[in-house]
Image (tube, helix red, strand yellow):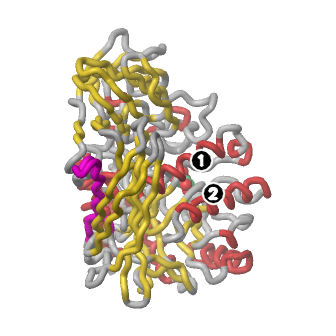
Amino acid sequence: MDRIITTHGLRKVCEPTPVWTFTTLDPGGLSQPVNALVPGAWESIPGLKNYRGRAVYEKQLNCGGTLRFVFGGVSFRAKVFLDDRLLARHYGAYTAFDCLAEDVPFGRHTLRVEVDNLFGGDSALHVPNDYYSYGGITRPVTVEQLGSAYITRLHVTPKRRGRMWLAQVEVALRSISDEDQTVDVELKAGPGAVSWKRRSLSARGEITLTAELMAPGVTPWTPENPQLYTAEAVLWLEGEPADDLRDRFGFREVKAEGGRLLLNDEPILIKGVNRHEEYAQFGCAVPVEAMVQDVQLMKDLGCNLVRTCHYPNDPRFLDLCDQYGLMVWEEAHARGLSLQQMQHPAFMEQTMLCIDEMIAQHRNHPSIILWGCLNECDDEHDEGAAIYRQCFRRIHELDASRPMTAALLGRTTSQVLADMDVVSMNLYPLWYHDTPVSDYLGGIKTWINQHGGAGKPFIVSEIGAGAIAGYHDPFGQAKWSEERQAAILREQISAVMAHPETAGIILWQFADIRLDDGSFASRPKCMNNKGLMDEYRRPKLSYAAVKELFHR
Ligand code: ADA
């Protein structure tokens, strides 16, 4: 299923069985249809490791009535058809989308999804990059059966007033009937409850109900004690419970104040890793078992935060972070785009869509303490800086309850420091250049303070070094050896932790990741090899070095 929690007790939800018929349409594909796993990346199918093109997934379903199809993630363009009727189109691999099919006669129907992962054309965010843009239906698909109205959204925002916790709740309903209806809604959120009686829901209309609930006696969510609560909304039609939606949330407050990041008013020092959602033979369709293991490995390393570089993650991973007490910096999709790439005609629309979907879909997760966007894009020209500001504004408009940030390229040219809640920079001393870490960090921080970043928390959002797993130099001198990587990480971590003005460090990166073949000349094995582990999570020497320093 699409979550590790139950989101509906009343609404009928099923997951189609996992084997779909799969046909490639372009050269380099397969000569005939095969069985393929959903969710799955097609690169896992023998012969398709490098397939970039179009493909069709088909599934026979026995269904009828009013159906809602929810796609957790399709990489990276999708067109959804039910019996040849186009229901939806979506761009972007890393957020969910849904579509409705009304009055479907009960019987056998074909769900067809046309998918492609072709670069170029309208694609502004998925471009050849320092990670791989996979192909396929890569996150779970669910099919829901709806009545004449349903709950589209349930958001809970924890608030603190003095010593008292409150839950601000928002429930949205949509009618899928041609007649006006009168509805009742009941909502519970932790210890609080509210009900709305006899509300009018016009034909095909939508309403949003809001309330502020007191939450006496609750235990706040912290990484050490990740206490979670359930919120549940029930929609009543004609005196009968007709639909429901549940989610989990936590009571916690995040603030950026006086140069520090505060969680429930306590300063936090971030010790984190950057994790790409990817696992050796499964590509970006990471099985939940491997997600659990990743979270356990991060806890073992002594991490308190994971950054979902460079896109929103599978909600099952976020559920696990909520539950295990791992804080999250969740980031909208975009990595290293030049001004010209940011001026692609589709860039703004695709970026805003990703921000909107990420926040709407993930905002209840208490583990998310920071929203991020636009990793290392153009922030030094007026036009690029203006785009950063638009994204920051959009994030704040949608959710002002968390600080926002962006991992900037570590250079002294940024124009957006004054616009961010938290200043973050990616720095690679001792890897891409040999400046001693503390000199480099000191210089950058002084510049930040003089250019709009003074008084804001400062995070080193990436730092690290490469190593080819299994390549050794007992003297620790050879570039790409495990020994040298471990030695560099020791120096980097010690210097950042010793700097009085840093709110934390996020290492690049958790595990090695795959790249396009185009990277062969600069990235050995066509991988980004700066992982503390290889792509199968086999630890390099740096794992133990980081573990020791992070547990101090
Ligand atoms: C950047 C970028 C990462 C990765 C890293 C590296 O900081 O944000 O995606 O490419 O550099 O390995 O050089």
Quarter of the image for residue 306 reads bottom left
Above/below status of 268 relative to 186: below
Asked whether 108 falls inside the magenta stretch, the response is no
Q: Is mark 2 within 8 Å of ligand 1?
A: no
Q: Which residue is denoted by mark 2 in the rendering?
A: 391
Callout 1 touching callout 2 (CB < 8 Å): yes
User: Could you tell me residue 458's position as x and y percent?
Assistant: 56, 75
The image quadrant where one finds the C terminus is bottom left
Mark sitting earlier along the chain (1/2)? 1
For the record, the magenta segment spans 228-249
User: Could you tell me residue 201's position as x and y percent?
Assistant: 43, 49
| Left/right of residue 256 with respect to residue 281 in the rendered view | right
Q: Give the CA separation, mark 1 to mark 2.
A: 8 Å
| Left/right of residue 108 with respect to residue 402 in the rendered view | left
Q: Which residue is denoted by mark 1 in the rendering?
A: 351
Under mark 2, the amino acid is Cys
Of residue 187 and residue 493, the one placed in the foreground of this image is 187
Q: What's the residue at 58%, 65% (across, down)?
A: 396
Q: Secondary structure at mark 2?
A: helix
User: Could you tell me residue 380's position as x and y percent?
Assistant: 75, 59
| Left/right of residue 290 with respect to residue 362 in the rendered view | left
Quarter of the image for residue 296 reads bottom left
Of residue 499 and residue 251, the one placed in the foreground of this image is 251
